[in-house]
Image (tube, rainbow, N blue to C red):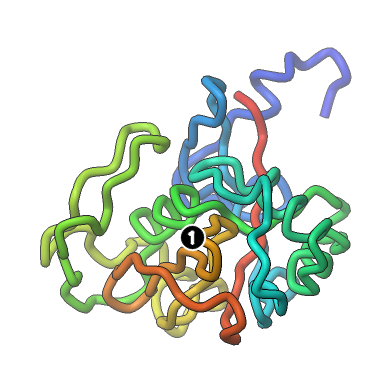
Amino acid sequence: MDINTPAALVNTPGAIGAAFGGGFFAGLIKVDGKAFALVVSPKLFGEFKGRWIASDESVPGAEDYADGLANTNAMAAAGSELAKTVRGSVIEGFDDWYIPARDELELIYRNLKPTDYENSASFRDGENPSSMPMGRHYTEDWPAQTGVADFREGGTQALDAVWHWSSTQAGPSGAWGQDFSLGCQFTNGRSCEGRARAVRRLEI
């Protein structure tokens, strides 16, 4: 990349699912009034498993619905092995990967849904004030299975059709997760074993 290329152009992604920023473009998210391109890590290097945290103590600073980086840093500082592993990862030359916040994880499901199953479409699933455009409640048919072949179920980059951790704490003993088969958004006990897919973001 030419050193004289403006940052805004360097950080402008292509289509959803396109190779970008060490991974794949998953959509636009707003954090603290700034717009970012969200990047999903390559599955081979960016998929992790573990407990959100082993402790029952509340984790200060891990409550944000959009800022997964801040949440993950707070988790790591509180002793989360999962968060420390993700934050310590170097993938495609980048070391700023983190566990997505609740709204970031929802955006990934909406744009890169792996299955062709009907969505659960409960009263809260899909609501996302942080995404650009804002997310609305799911219907049984929307969002549909992604058109990006590598992210469809069985594809090389597809998110497994199981629930994934977000980095957003929910109450003193839970954290938000998202199911990648039906789209359910729910809280789970933080000591449960679950998957996490690392992401990074680039301001645009």
In the depicted structure, whether residue 144 falls above or below residue 6: below
Q: Is residue 92 left or right of residue 137?
A: right
Picture coordinates of residue 163, whole percent (x, y)? 44, 78
> Quadrant of the rendered structure where residue 132 is?
top left
Residue at 56% across, 22% down: 34
In the depicted structure, whether residue 53 falls above or below residue 63: below
Q: Helix, strand, or loop for circle 1?
A: loop
Residue at 57% across, 32% down: 36
In the rendered picture of this protein, how many numbered marks are placed on residues? Answer: 1
Residue at 63% across, 51% down: 62
Instruction: Please name whichever residue, 85 or 188, is drawn nearer the observer in this view of the structure.
Output: 188
Q: Is residue 3 left or right of residue 162?
A: right
Which residue does the numbered mark 1 point to in the structure image?
Answer: 171
Rate crowding at label 1 as few (under 14), some (14 to 19) or many (20 or more) other CA atoms within 10 Å.
few
Mark 1 residue type: Gly
Residue at 27% across, 47% down: 127
Picture coordinates of residue 176, whole percent (x, y)? 46, 64
Picture coordinates of residue 139, whole percent (x, y)? 12, 59
- Residue extending farthest to the left is 140
In the depicted structure, whether residue 57 falls above or below residue 194: above
